[in-house]
Amino acid sequence: MKLTLHTDYALRVLMTLAVLEGRVVSIEELARRHRVSENHLRKVAQTLVGMGLVAGVRGRAGGLRLAVDPRSVRMGGVVRALEEDVALVECLGEGPASCALAGACRLTGALARALDAFFAELDRLTLADLAGRGPAMRAKLGLDAAVAS
């Protein structure tokens, strides 16, 4: 399974905002820190605000901040909400399968179990778990302890 760039960027934004513990961060700063397009991040931000995970702060010093307790956000739910199609193969999707082996193939069940295991692992993790709030994450983001605290 490959996550879309939209989901990838959304997870990065959420982890960054969790590490910054309430600090308002501009989209420009996020784009610079993650070396991604501001336009892409604006779309991601809109999605995350719509989901209620991120708050948009207006004004000159505006930007984004985490709107929820990172310990309450289960990552499986986030990925499910962000990904439109998680079917690994056509026969796991909601539409009619065109595979000649549909109904007789054991691969369908195996792939369904693999997808369940993938989401079970993500459901086990919270945003706080992923953010870690440790020095390694801050260092990767180019933050010093004074800015992040």
Image (spheres, rainbow, N blue to C red):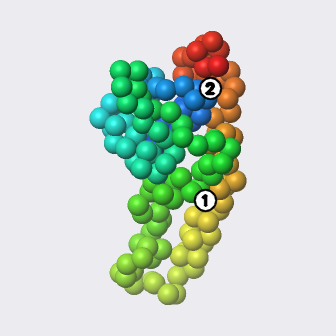
Q: Which residue is mark 2?
A: 137
Q: Position of residue 65 (x, y in %)?
A: 50, 33
Depicted 112 relative to depicted 23: above or below: below
Q: Secondary structure at mark 2?
A: helix
Q: Amino acid at mark 2?
A: Met
Q: Amino acid at mark 1?
A: Phe
Q: Position of residue 84 (x, y in %)?
A: 41, 61
- Please give the name of the residue rendered at 40% of the width and 21% of the height, measured from the top-left corner: 61
Residue 23 can be seen, yes or no: yes
Residue 1 can be seen, yes or no: no
Q: Secondary structure at mark 1?
A: helix
Question: Which label sits on residue 34?
Answer: none
Q: Which residue is mark 1?
A: 119
Indicate the quadrant where residue 119 lies.
bottom right
Q: Tags 1 and 2 in contact by the CB under 8 Å rule? A: no
- Please give the name of the residue rendered at 53% of the width and 52% of the height, measured from the top-left corner: 78
